[in-house]
Image: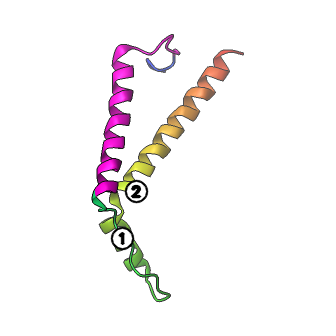
């Protein structure tokens, strides 16, 4: 199945460093965006918005949150697969 099939005993130094670096970068990015006030502003809500306008709003102003959510979903799916494999191996 692959090298991720076996559960690691401890966090490695590289794993700890990577996790800390990721958290630090996301925190720094959000802090800078908050301080500078450059959060994307949504368009005015209207009842005559078409799907084309909604798509343009998502892909012009909200690309980063969209990509972060997609990454979070992928990580959640991989975690669910790993948990399923571990629980099957314990039986």
Measured as percent of width and height from the top left, residue 28 is found at 31, 43
Please tell me whether mark 1 or mark 2 is closer to you in this view: 1
Judging depth in this view, the residue of 24 and 83 nearest the camera is 24
- What residue is drawn where x is 68% and y is 15%? 90
- What residue is drawn where x is 47% and y is 86%? 46
* Dominant secondary structure (helix, strand or loop) of the stretch shown in magenta: helix
Rendered position, 6 above or below 59 = above
Rendered position, 72 above or below 62 = above
Rendered position, 43 above or below 89 = below
Give the residue at mark 2: 66
Which disc number belongs to residue 26? none
Q: Which residues are magenta?
A: 6-35
Judging depth in this view, the residue of 43 and 36 nearest the camera is 36
Instruction: Count the numbered circles shown.
Output: 2
Disc on the earlier residue, 1 or 2? 1
Which residue is situated farthest in the top direction here?
Answer: 9
Which residue is situated farthest in the front direction here?
Answer: 35
Mark 2 crowdedness (10 Å alpha carbons): few <14, some 14-19, many ≥20? few
- Is residue 8 covered in magenta? yes
Q: Secondary structure at mark 2?
A: helix
Which residue is situated farthest in the right direction here?
Answer: 91
Measured as percent of width and height from the top left, residue 84 is found at 62, 28
- What residue is drawn where x is 40% and y is 49%? 68
Location of residue 22 by image quarter: top left
Q: Secondary structure at mark 1?
A: loop
- What residue is drawn where x is 64% and y is 16%? 89
Measured as percent of width and height from the top left, residue 72 is found at 46, 44
Q: Quadrant of the C terminus?
A: top right
Give the residue at mark 1: 41
Which residue is situated farthest in the bottom direction here?
Answer: 48
Structure colour scheme? rainbow
């Amino acid at each position: 199945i692959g090298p991720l099939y076996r559960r690691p005993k401890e966090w490695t130094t590289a794993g700890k460093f990577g996790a800390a670096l990721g958290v630090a970068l996301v925190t720094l990015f959000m802090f800078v965006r908050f301080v500078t006030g450059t959060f994307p502003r949504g368009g005015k809500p209207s009842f005559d918005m078409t799907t084309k306008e909604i798509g343009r709003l998502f892909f012009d102003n909200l690309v980063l949150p969209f990509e972060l959510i997609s990454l979070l979903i992928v990580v959640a799916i991989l975690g669910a697969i790993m948990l399923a494999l571990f629980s099957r191996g314990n039986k």
